[in-house]
Amino acid sequence: MKGIVYTRVSSDEQVKGTSLESQEEQCRRYCEQKGIEVVGLFRDEGESAKTIKRTEFLRALEFLRVNKGKIEAFVVLRLDRFARNAEDHFAVRKILTDYGVALHSVTEPIGAGPAEKFIETVLAGAAEFENAIRRQRCIDGLSKKVEQGIWPWFPPIGYRCSQFKKQGLRKIAPDPQDLETAPLIKRAFKEYLTGLYPLKAIAEKLDEWGLGKIRGRPTNWQFVDRMLQNPFYAGILPNPWTKKEIKGLHEALISEEEFGRVQLIRQGRGYGLVGKRLREHPDFPLRKTALCGGCRMPLTGAWTRGRSKKYPYYRCYNPKCSLRELGIPKKTIEEDFIACLEKVAPRKEFLERLKNKVIKIWQEKSKIYADEAEKHKKRLALLEGKRKKIFEMREDSSYSKEEFLERKEAVDNEIAVEKISMSEARIEQLNLESLLSFTEQFLEAVARWWQDIPDILKPRFQKLVFPEGVLYKRGEGFGTAKLGLLFELSQRFDAKNYIDVAGAGIAPAPGGSLAPSVSEGNGLYHAPEGSSSL
């Protein structure tokens, strides 16, 4: 008996691993046991994940058609390698039957007998149900563990994972504190609660205390922000499925009250809880952005009592700074900041070209899979027409019976593959027109927006423009500083040297969000020869 082997994976990761080799090895071992001579091996190496095609599967069906009567077995590891749903399974199954080829599953008891056919039918229809049940059981088990107060996953830094899995056991005890890192994390929370330090400063302090050396890499503000939002440190376990918060059995690093205060500070609403020196006090929105011209430390602010009323001032409280305690009137510095925003506001020409470029690139990138699906649809329509014509030519005796069967079987193979490919094509659509129009209006009038929004939101607004703050010198105003991406692009934009090229710097990211990046040839800026480019 002669047969062919078909193996398939649906991702590059599996191709690079051992999945295909393992499938082939098991299939060949099965053929040896059943006395099947393997005359062909067809491997779809993750192609369906990229282009939603099954080139080798079509080649396998064509091989069977051309060698009709000579091949008797089509061997797969299991039925889900053959087709993804019952409809596709039985469509291709009929083609194999017409060729006189039996489907063999290495791991499942299918065959030509009534009982075996029934088993095959059940297996073809139950694969998705079985996966759903397995996933639900896993979720139920994990959810129950959380309800018991034990975190079933790896704990955050500051705790040591209970190594039950390595011992072949399920996790039955809470994770203990790590004696080396727990004190550092706890100290970071306490420092942030003073309201004196931004996230970047906390990250720097953690590295000064030795966390960077322990982790083997520098600590950044994003790490600190995620850490401050993690309720695990307050002894709270959020159940991702029921959305309930469970009291954990592990020892907390901070109290629930302290954790709540931390969240208020992060949201700019906690100034009344931590004293007058809180950096995000709504009366002094520039405390997080304006840096002292003498020591480059963030300015703070406070109200000074006069004879009849209080007066707001920004000042530096660094004891080593020569400008310490030298107050700057709130009105003066904030008017200077408005003028600074007007200088860095993107120009209309840049915003218009940016909007058009983003839309163009997004459409080009996101159309790939949609176009692929449309191609399969059109191809399927042509094949259906071709199949109808074959029947018509048989009816008017243009084809003999043998010619008709050969032509019909060939086109049926192609139709089956196109249907499978089309059913796997998916694309998420996103309309950017209204979003980009609002962004254009916002960026063009950035100074006015800063004045109109509530004071408590201004620190976060300022981060978009000056991610690392901006230096302020008394009598001189604000100096130059590192700008946010779009503001930096606008400053470097030169309409005369603008070249409309394919954009490599802005593309759709997983999940449907925009992921802008600065790179050569982004289509928005072209530096003159001899100068640096974005």
Image (cartoon, helix red, strand yellow):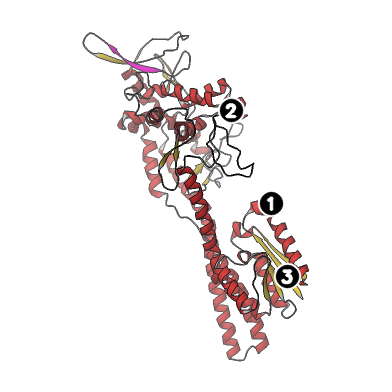
On the image, the x and y values in percent for residue 475 come to 39, 14
Residue 298 among magenta residues: yes
Q: Is residue 511 left or right of residue 304?
A: right
Q: Are marks 1 and 2 in contact (CB under 8 Å)?
A: no
> Is 520 or 2 nearer to us in this picture?
2
* Callout 1 crowding tier (Cα within 10 Å): few <14, some 14–19, many ≥20: few
The single residue placed furthest to the left in the displayed view is 308
Q: How far apart in space, not on screen, are marks 1 and 3 (Cα)?
A: 23 Å
Helix, strand or loop: magenta stretch: loop
Position of 116 relative to 253 (above/below): below
Between residues 313 and 471, which one lies in front from this camera angle? Answer: 313
Whole-number angstrom distance, CA of label 3 to CA of label 2: 54 Å
Could you say whether the residue bearing mark 1 is in a helix, strand or loop? Answer: loop
Amino acid on which the number 1 mark rests in the picture: Gly
Give the residue at mark 1: 17
Q: Residue at x 67, y 85 (%)?
A: 403
Front residue of 361 and 533: 361
Answer with the quarter of the image where residue 89 lies. Answer: bottom right
Q: Is residue 534 magenta?
A: no
Residue 48 x/y as whole percent: 61, 60
Residue highlighted by disc 3: 4
> Which numbered disc, 1 or 2, marks the residue closer to the eye?
1
Picture coordinates of residue 150, whole percent (x, y): 50, 40
Question: Which comes before the other along the chain, label 1 or label 3?
Answer: 3
**Where does label 2 land, which residue?**
218
Q: Mark 1 or mark 2: name the one nearer the start of the chain.
A: 1
